[in-house]
């Protein structure tokens, strides 16, 4: 959990329906915290950039970076390759066949080992004593890293043996001093435009993987899997990139939070505690898990993150065509099951609680779209108002709010975590006012971010005008439903 309530409780959090004040405050706070966590971790994982900046950027080279072209200062006493003297010099200092091919200027791409061997033979035939003058059999350019290609490839494919993927992006982390030394020697003795070590190593790894599995495609952005190899320890890190599903959910019963909410007593630890009966959850069900768990299981994924277009409170239903959301599926082993199959699993798992009509594969871009949307919404609300004797007059009063701009001071129940300010919101329309004893029900459409319950009970006058004010009677909210989210 990387989320802190204060950090991510931005504007996207305003788009929620108010909840009763009082004892629920703490629960609300906590929910806020966990609900924000998904978005927080999403932020920090945003594409590849952040992963890269966390490490020392200059030492890591990902395929797709621009190549640096280092102009060389020519040393006429020991000229750079491809001059025969230059080739003889790099052989003398011990370069391996791979690096020889790379810096000799004789080969740009291709099987560097074979090309290097023949360049070496040629040089030996020019100078009979050259072989005996070799200073060491340890390549100063790559520190014999090319000998580890097979080992690296084994590790990479081993790590990914259970994972389904098509595209791969490759990165390598080399010790800074090796990179600098390689750069120095290559600039001085290598042919102009010689390929740098990192690019050459990655290319050699690509080539070997390509021989073993022709279906893998190497890409420079948006891969299914990112592989980072440490050139010193040969440690392989595999980042299986998340996949995303877009849909709309209806929450047809009350009492379900939108996102997973860990148990308050044990903070959701593995195995849970007595108070959560071992589930680790405060509420067993959440929209996130009712939809996400069958998907996570089917795709062999590690976890999910839920990104909703705003959200309703636990006690509020969400009906109509449903609320748009993006389900982020983290580290999936499978990534292309037909959405129809996933839908069937979701419908079975969430039956009677949450409904989804369609799931569509999408990209991370959709998360921002959904998060940033500021749609009008239609609600049905039922409340108690005692002492209404003239229903006709009451209805007129309520309808007079239709089309009005209302001022909402930050509600008391959120004032400790929200800046105190007055929000100006429009009540687009009010319809279907009906009376039943001392209960009133109505439908209203209003701007995103309107505190609907406060609009009815006025929050002790903090919302102006309000239904309570026009009726001149205390109003107590009984229930609230989101009837439609107008996101088109
Ligand atoms: Zn080498
Ligand atoms: Zn617990």
Image (cartoon, rainbow, N blue to C red):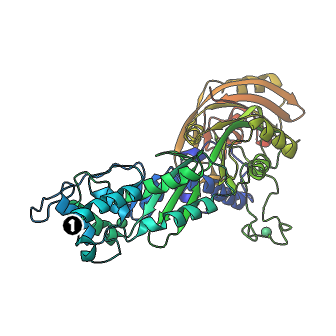
Dot 1: what SS? loop
> Label 1, on which residue?
127
Going 48% across and 73% down the picture, which residue do you hit?
A: 233
Asked if residue 210 lies left or right of residue 378, the reply is left
Where 176 sits versus 422, above or below? below
Q: Is residue 417 visible?
A: no
Residue sitting nearer the eye, 126 or 180: 126
Where 192 sits versus 246, above or below? below
Question: Which quadrant of the rendered structure holds the C terminus?
Answer: top right
Residue 75 rendering spot, x and y as whole percentages? 11, 62
Question: Which quadrant of the rendered structure holds the N terminus?
Answer: bottom right
How many marks are shown on the rendered structure? 1
Q: Residue 200 is drawn in which quadrant?
A: bottom left
Residue sitting nearer the eye, 248 or 409: 248
Asked if residue 333 lies left or right of residue 464, the reply is right
Going 83% across and 26% down the picture, which residue do you hit?
A: 434
* Residue sitting farthest toward the left: 76
Residue 387 rendering spot, x and y as whole percentages? 83, 36
Residue 367 rendering spot, x and y as whole percentages? 59, 42
């Amino acid at each position: 959990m990387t989320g802190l309530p204060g950090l991510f409780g931005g504007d996207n959090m305003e788009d929620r329906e108010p909840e009763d004040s009082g004892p629920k405050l703490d629960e609300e706070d906590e929910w806020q915290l966990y609900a924000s966590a998904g978005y927080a971790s999403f932020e920090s994982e945003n594409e590849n950039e952040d992963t890269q900046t966390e490490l020392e950027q200059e030492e890591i080279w990902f395929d797709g970076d621009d190549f640096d072209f280092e102009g060389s200062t020519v040393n006429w006493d020991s000229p750079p390759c491809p001059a025969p003297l230059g080739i003889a010099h790099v052989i003398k200092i011990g370069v391996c066949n791979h690096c020889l091919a790379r810096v000799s200027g004789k080969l740009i791409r291709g099987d560097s080992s074979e090309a290097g061997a023949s360049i070496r033979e040629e040089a030996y035939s020019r100078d009979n004593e050259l072989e005996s003058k070799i200073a060491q059999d340890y390549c100063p350019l790559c520190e014999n890293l090319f000998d580890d290609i097979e080992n690296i490839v084994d590790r990479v494919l081993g790590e990914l043996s259970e994972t389904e993927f098509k595209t791969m992006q490759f990165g390598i982390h080399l010790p800074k001093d090796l990179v600098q030394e390689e750069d120095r020697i290559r600039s001085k003795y290598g042919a102009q435009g010689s390929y740098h070590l990192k690019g050459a190593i990655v290319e050699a790894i690509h080539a070997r993987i390509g021989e073993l599995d022709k279906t893998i495609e190497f890409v420079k952005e948006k891969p299914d899997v990112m592989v980072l190899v440490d050139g010193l320890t040969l440690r392989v890190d595999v980042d299986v990139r998340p996949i995303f599903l877009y849909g709309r959910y209806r929450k047809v019963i009350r009492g379900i939070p939108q996102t997973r909410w860990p148990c308050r007593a044990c903070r959701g630890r593995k195995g849970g505690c007595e108070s959560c009966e071992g589930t680790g959850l405060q509420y067993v069900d959440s929209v996130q898990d009712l939809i996400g768990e069958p998907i996570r299981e089917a795709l062999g994924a590690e976890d999910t993150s839920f990104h909703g277009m705003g959200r309703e409170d636990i006690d509020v239903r969400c009906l109509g065509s449903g609320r748009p959301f993006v389900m982020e599926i983290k580290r999936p082993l499978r990534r292309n099951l037909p959405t129809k199959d996933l839908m069937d699993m979701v419908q079975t798992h969430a039956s009677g609680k949450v409904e989804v009509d369609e799931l569509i594969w999408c990209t991370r871009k959709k998360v921002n779209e959904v998060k940033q949307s500021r749609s009008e919404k239609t609600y049905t609300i039922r409340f108690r108002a005692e002492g209404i004797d003239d229903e006709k007059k009451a209805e007129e009063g309520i309808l007079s709010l239709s089309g009005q701009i209302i001022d909402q001071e930050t509600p008391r129940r959120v004032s400790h975590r929200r800046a105190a300010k007055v929000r100006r919101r429009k009540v687009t329309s009010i319809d279907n006012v009906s009376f039943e004893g001392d209960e009133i029900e109505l439908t209203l459409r209003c701007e995103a971010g309107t505190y609907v319950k406060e609009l009815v009970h006025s929050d002790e006058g903090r919302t102006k005008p309000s239904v309570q004010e026009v009726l001149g009677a205390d109003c107590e909210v009984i229930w609230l439903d989101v009837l439609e989210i107008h996101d088109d």
